[in-house]
Image: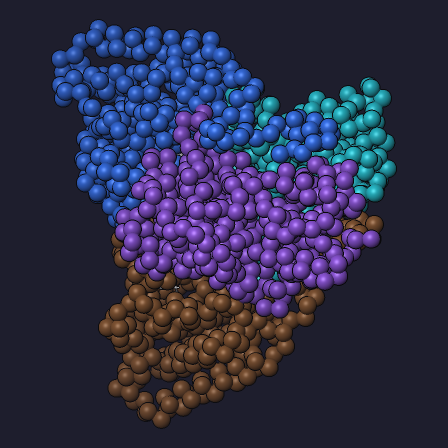
Chain colours: A cyan, B purple, C blue, D brown
Amino acid sequence: MTGMSETTYRDALRQALDDAMGADSTIVVLGEEVGRYGGAYGVTKGLIERHGADRVIDAPISEAAIVGAAVGAAMTGLRPVAELMYVDFLGLAMDQLANQAAKIRYMFGGQVGVPMVLRTQGGTGRSAGAQHSQSLEAWSVHTPGLRVAMPATVSDAYHLLRHALTLPDPVVFIEHKALYTRKGGLDPAAPDAPWGRAVVRRPGRNVTLVAYSRMVHSALEAAAALAEAGIEAEVIDLRTLNPLDMETVAASVTRTGRAVVVSEACLTGGVAAEIAARIQEDCFDWLEEPVIRVAGEDVPIPVSPGLEAASIPGAPLIADAVRMMLP
Amino acid sequence: MTGMSETTYRDALRQALDDAMGADSTIVVLGEEVGRYGGAYGVTKGLIERHGADRVIDAPISEAAIVGAAVGAAMTGLRPVAELMYVDFLGLAMDQLANQAAKIRYMFGGQVGVPMVLRTQGGTGRSAGAQHSQSLEAWSVHTPGLRVAMPATVSDAYHLLRHALTLPDPVVFIEHKALYTRKGGLDPAAPDAPWGRAVVRRPGRNVTLVAYSRMVHSALEAAAALAEAGIEAEVIDLRTLNPLDMETVAASVTRTGRAVVVSEACLTGGVAAEIAARIQEDCFDWLEEPVIRVAGEDVPIPVSPGLEAASIPGAPLIADAVRMMLP
Amino acid sequence: MPAPTDRLPFELYRTMCRIRAFEERVGELFVRQETAGSMLHLSIGEEGAAAGIGSAMRAGDSFTTHHRGHGIFLARGGQPDRMMAEIAGKRTGYCRGKGGSMHIADMGLGHLGANAIVGGGIPAVVGAGLSYRRLKKDAVSVAFFGDGAMQQGILYESMNMAALWRLPVLFVCINNQYGMGTRIDRASANLAWDLRARSFGLEAENADGVDVMEVRGAAERLLAAAREGRPGFLAVSCYRFYGHARMDKSPYRTPEEEEEGRARDPIARLRADLLAGDAREAELDTIVEAAGREMDAAVDFAVAAPRPEPGELFEDVYGPDQPAPLPVRRRIETILGGGVAR
Amino acid sequence: MPAPTDRLPFELYRTMCRIRAFEERVGELFVRQETAGSMLHLSIGEEGAAAGIGSAMRAGDSFTTHHRGHGIFLARGGQPDRMMAEIAGKRTGYCRGKGGSMHIADMGLGHLGANAIVGGGIPAVVGAGLSYRRLKKDAVSVAFFGDGAMQQGILYESMNMAALWRLPVLFVCINNQYGMGTRIDRASANLAWDLRARSFGLEAENADGVDVMEVRGAAERLLAAAREGRPGFLAVSCYRFYGHARMDKSPYRTPEEEEEGRARDPIARLRADLLAGDAREAELDTIVEAAGREMDAAVDFAVAAPRPEPGELFEDVYGPDQPAPLPVRRRIETILGGGVAR
Ligand SMILES: Cc1ncc(C[n+]2csc(CCOP(=O)(O)OP(=O)(O)O)c2C)c(N)n1
Ligand SMILES: Cc1ncc(C[n+]2csc(CCOP(=O)(O)OP(=O)(O)O)c2C)c(N)n1
Ligand SMILES: [Mg+2]
Ligand SMILES: [Mg+2]
């Protein structure tokens, strides 16, 4: 398939898996309900029919062993895609991810890698409660040896996943539950940018908004609102958190002199802190104002819809932060 | 016992547990080898003889269930001290810590708290390898609902633990394996400062070094070396990471105009990022230079002693960073 | 407090009818989009487990449940109106609207909490057992979970601890034959789960969930043993009448299988048994109708109940007297106003 | 590649003597502070398990071990010099000095790695089993772990998966009676671990580790079954002759118990059996002496071996062709020099 077409984030992910499995016979998909059920959010629907139950493997509810089995498979010739139904379940599998997958190449002196992808999804938006709505990318970003990707667009859903499935190292690939039905253009032959490069989603000269995953769209919304008041916000989509492309960010902030980092994860100790710390490291002399973080509240996510929505940043808060920053 | 006496970090911890258990009959200690063996690092030695096997409970090697059992005990009238022998094992118990202990009060609308202490130890210094040498405080700091304490001194080992054992919420209490034999003064009647307040360990006016746990001592060492060259570094010991006392930090940085954050944890996504982000938020107009992080390298910890030592910051790097910062 | 023996079947009938009526209404509430959350798991078909075990427990006993726990909570005295309000995310719900269906709890009734992590609530009962022993409370703590949790490692860690320490604990597996779309035989290599429990040192029984009296009998025996320091495991087989969550139409099951499964109805079975005895239709109809009215009222209560106030977002992250987290907006205002954001 | 049957006991004797000699020397190296790391776990007393099972495995089979795995690695062909160098944290060690005793590995020999997390290496064999099946490799993957891991949930998750998917996998518990200072009966509520394994759908056997031929026989049967898609579990009982780690003097054991335990010596036992057959003392002595010489040479190799270069700290965090992490010092220089620190 070539040329641009319109599809959804969910379908783009499925197509990426499907295309990758067609191209690389060592890829297997492993996780709860990934086969016959087609995935809790429908991403893997149809893959078992196309690639067989040998390659699309329904696993028992054993997150630790699922990730651990993927590690062993990756060490012995397969390229597994393990799925955690919710990133919130990472706490069950974190030993296998952080102590095994991430460290094996290093501990074993480079003898072997663990080329696996841990696909999962996070975030709020479905009133799924404190144990099904988190944004836990920070744990993986703080673990040397892991790569972390968080696509915001349909095109990136496809291309970042395809690229992740060529890397020599474990990739934590975090989708957003509120993006699955989002539509956008996809050209399977043309990625937005190489893996590891951030992309300017909207140019502007007054302030830089740095975001990833769903917050890219909130930032774009805020930028549109700000534009009406004559404020031009540049919006950067990081796409991957490891690698973290500070060059693109610095190129923007040194022009705008102002930076707002936007993340859905709760503020304290989140990835936004890393990005903010780096921006002030890299762009100190250019900054007119402190780097501001617009992030999730430091609370567990409540179920009640109004409270849930208030627990994470939206376009109005982002826009207000920018307004407060400008002279 | 009153008045100041000289003791070790290890003995101070033991005394804190002993005194607290004497004062509060609901306290129980639960973990691997905490009883007859006396703890892998000897902290709980003798407690089983003094308080009985009913209160000092040797558990099977089941980290997830140890933490989970502590959660249940804390909800039903006990105040458990669960021990993880190494903070590196957190990946096995993270679901019980982050999804259960941390969120229960909130999810249940404030009906009940989880007054437990998770005692553990981390850090390098014994060539214990990638799975026994990490500094994983960032995972807990990023989890709303948890408190996090990391004592650097003998006095704080005692007082922070005593205080943790009075709090209504779960506390992750992270000791440092290289500090157990460290000596220092202890007055059980006089804490260095209230819980949640940072302490200036050495005053200075040219630069602020913000550290916690073992890195406080490396920072003090660097400050002493810098003093010989006439550079006065102020050293702040954060003591707790949640609460995080930015007032004390800001009071210093607004005087010195320069800040170096020191942490043993690997740099990217670590707590040093949060502290750096906050310093530039709070002290932007006072900063002469970007906030600098002197942290662990972004690598797993190697076993080979020379490499291990090179993987974390020492006083020379801290001092060099300060020298590079100064005009 | 078990009812006098001759009234017991009627009490169990009433409990099961109340559960069914509750679940039916909460399902409708979902369709009306009046519940909070995308996830709602109904326990229709599983009433025999809830009523049989719930009725055998005593005041002071405690329990945790999985995500499909409304019935168990009702069987232990949960108030339908406050439950329904919680499921609707309302302020007068059990958890002030913060927990919802999957995190409902009530310390007063010993409900240590539902859990959205499969297996997540299991080890808490080990801790509760430690508490009861140390605090000399004559109580048992019961973990309820689904067949899916039989594949979670923490279950076995917990079983071993309970048995090793001879704690007053009971593990109950409500085996509704499926974990989401996966039938038990595609998840579990050996379905003789009582053997697993015994191999970890527990007493173990199986009970047929279609027969609430059989469940009740097994629960009585195992609870008595647990009270004496012989913890146990009870597997109750039943059938999940409807989809995994309210949206799931179970395309992975055949209509024949579903029909057969739904024929294993603990309410219909007990009704038939009661009618075969000296019960009259009218008497049982009265119970059903009363349950319906009660639950209609609960729905009205929940729909009319107020939503949480915005400020409640920051409450109860930490204990009383502890400062609340600083809202992000306030942080930004403080920073850009030149102050220190705590 | 099993040796011809009549030479097999001699081969096993040689393997066990080599393991013992290796462990004795590595212990001395520790005392001389020439090993890297505070933790060194010797497998003296457990040679029967290592040799019995290791010899029954085939080239191409793979395995993971726990933290006490030197013997197993030697039995599978590990080179003592490169092992000793690794344990000493040297650059010519198996893992270039980065892994040490607890993370030694060799992909060439199918050693998928030792592990410092109790139970941490277990699920990898399930994954290896999946690989072998999909890649049509006639190989078995074996997880070796201690009795302490019988209380880690991930073991049961892995057992269930292996059985459910009929993978070529074998789980081996080396039961040396202790996990650190905790005797098995204070850690495990039911010691009939073969029942646990069966309840998860595995074939299961127990073997007495003092009798290497018995271990070998059980391993042969279970490996053959695993190769045919019937995964298994083997518990080998033995005794940890010395402390948990090299520093531990086992104050929690009585001298009588230790004496009795050390009497269960698989090497002495096989020697006696061989001598009762047609072996001569001198022949066996030659084996012992050769093992000693081999291990002395390994010590010399390790002591003389170079340490890693400082720059190696940043190598192998990510795959070849991937940029290495930026050293903190370089970051700071770049920042304060006004550049962008990647
Ligand atoms: C740890 C974890 N893994 C996966 C899920 C997703 N999930 C929710 S319910 C469920 C099926 C559970 O089946 P079972 O335990 O039999 O309970 P049932 O729904 O049948 O009552 C799954 C896989 C989860 N919530 N938690
Ligand atoms: C997950 C985890 N918990 C605890 C430890 C600390 N620890 C190291 S070895 C050990 C005992 C292990 O006993 P066993 O499995 O019987 O192996 P053995 O040492 O007897 O060979 C413990 C508790 C660890 N390394 N990993
Ligand atoms: Mg089920
Ligand atoms: Mg052992």
Q: Report the number of numbered marks.
A: 0
Q: Nearer the viewer, residue C4 or A275?
A: A275
Q: Quadrant of residue C56?
A: top left
Q: Quadrant of the N terminus of chain C?
A: top left
Which x, y percent locates residue D40? Answer: 46, 69
Which x, y percent locates residue C268? Answer: 26, 18
Q: Can residue D313 be seen from the camera position used here? A: yes
- Residue at the far bottom: name it: D282
Q: Can residue A8 be seen from the camera position used here? A: no
Left-right relation of D198 to A284 = left
- The residue under the point 36% across, 51% down is B18
- The residue under the point 21% across, 8% down is C283
Q: Quadrant of the C terminus of chain C?
A: top right
- The residue under the point 61% across, 48% down is B200
- The residue under the point 30% across, 31% down is C62
Which x, y percent locates residue D161? Answer: 43, 49
Which x, y percent locates residue A273? Answer: 67, 40
Does B166 sit above or below residue C327?
A: below
Q: Nearer the viewer, residue B85 or C238?
A: B85
Q: Quadrant of ligand 2?
A: bottom left
Left-right relation of D223 to D278 = right
Q: Nearer the viewer, residue C158 or A110?
A: C158
Left-right relation of A180 to C2 = right
